[in-house]
Amino acid sequence: METVGHAGPSPYTGVMHKTRPIARFVRFTACLALAACSLASLTGCLPNRVVIDLAPGDGSLAETQVLIDPGAGRSAPKIAQIDLQGLISHAPSPGLLSGRSNAVDSIVTRLRKAEDDPMVRAVILRINSPGGTVAASETIYSEIRGFRERSGKPVIVSMGEVAASGGYYIALAADHIIAQPTSITGSIGVIVQTFNFSRGMDRIGISGRAVVSRENKAIANPFETPVEEHYRILQHLTDQFYEQFRTLVADRRPQIRNGSASLDTITDGRVFTGAEGVQLGVVDETGSLRDAFERAKALVNLDRARLVKYHAQGVTVGSPYATTLDHHPTVMRNASGGGITLAPVRVDLPGGTGLPGFGGEPSESGFYYLWIAPTP
């Protein structure tokens, strides 16, 4: 990391050193982070993560070699690793001072890079996600299938800690699915979380009423008495999205017919381990990321290859397991040439509920292919 050089004594009395604005900026952002932590501890109702981007980068992608076979040179064919992490959504990741790319954009730009590089022979999609919105999950699935059809390059999924619900939906686009024995997958289904506060509001003498054009405009309004017709409409949409998911599972995983459980059981929303997934037919084999590398080489008839990991410029990558979220460190320089590298600051706060739109990760209302992990 570059450090700020001392500007030396100023020849003019009362003139501020060139380095001080940078130092003040860093102190200011640190104070913001501390203030966020303090507020969260006092109120207990703020989101459980605060992200402060000190300076966004230009979003350009870099690649780092993270594995190489013995005897393979720098000109050996490449297997590209693309990471899908966290909530799958069209919305940007949370940032206090600036925005960042969303999961859909992140995957699409990396697929384009792999497609345009003739040295890339296959792609490993490393999934560590509990899912996300229905639309974003479907978009990424379609983009992966389009990449496969245009480029002819196979896609191998490597499941990390969790690849459930929307994460599994996306995995269905792959030619081959490998899960760690302890990966959590499944959760095939749809959830739309609703709340209603009308009874509690009545008790304290508060009422809420929306002025709407027709009776179903303010569907499931949390401030008014529940209307059963509203929930029938939501259930109808939920059933449609679920049937789409279930049909995709049946079409893409014919192995389920020879598995240890019926399609109805597998698609009832339950989760299972990667090892169980093999028995059920929803996963092809158990193995590590290195095993996925070997499988990718076998699919394209390579004896030796390099594994390269795509990531944002400025992110340090030391292994295939490095976190490569789209944070873009930037160097701020002063007039004398000194500078400091400004990296994003993320503060994880306790107290999230884990419910969509209620203090957990998902902040968008709507329909989700999402596994909400139990909160201890």
Image: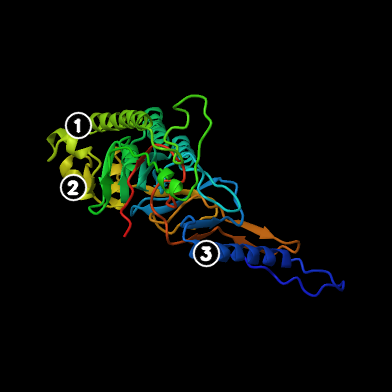
Q: Judge the density around disc 1: few (<14), some (14-19), many (≥20) Cα neighbours within 10 Å.
A: few
Find the distance from the CA under tag 1 to the CA under tag 3.
Answer: 49 Å
Q: Quadrant of the N terminus?
A: bottom right
Is 40 or 186 nearer to us in this picture? 40
Determine the residue located farthest toward the right in the rendered image: 12
SS type, badge 2: helix
* Mark 1, secondary structure of its residue: helix
Query: Which tag, 1 or 2, sits closer to the chain's start?
Result: 1
- Whole-number angstrom distance, CA of label 1 to CA of label 2: 16 Å
Q: Write down the residue under mark 2.
A: 276
| Quadrant containing the C terminus in the rendered view | bottom left
**Nearer the viewer's eye, disc 2 or disc 3?**
3
Q: Where on the picture, by quarter, is residue 9?
A: bottom right
Q: Amino acid at mark 3?
A: Cys
Seen in the image, is 27 located left or right of residue 217? right
Residue 318 x, y percent position in the rendering: 43, 59
Crowd tier of the residue under label 3, counting other residues whose Cα lies within 10 Å: few below 14, some 14–19, many 20 or above: some
Identify the residue under disc 3. Answer: 37
Circles 2 and 3: CB distance less than 8 Å?
no
The amino acid marked with disc number 1 is Pro
**Crowding near pointer 2: few (<14 within 10 Å), some, many (20+)?**
some
* SS at circle 3: helix
What's the residue at 61%, 66% (across, down)? Answer: 31
Percent across and percent down for residue 127 are: 35, 46
Camera-side residue: 219 or 77?
A: 219
- Taking the image as shown, residue 54 lies to the left or right of residue 45, namely right
Question: Which residue is denoted by mark 1 in the rendering?
Answer: 254
Q: Is residue 20 left or right of residue 64?
A: right
Q: Nearer the viewer, residue 142 or 215?
A: 215
Residue at the spot x=35%, y=38% of the render? Answer: 170
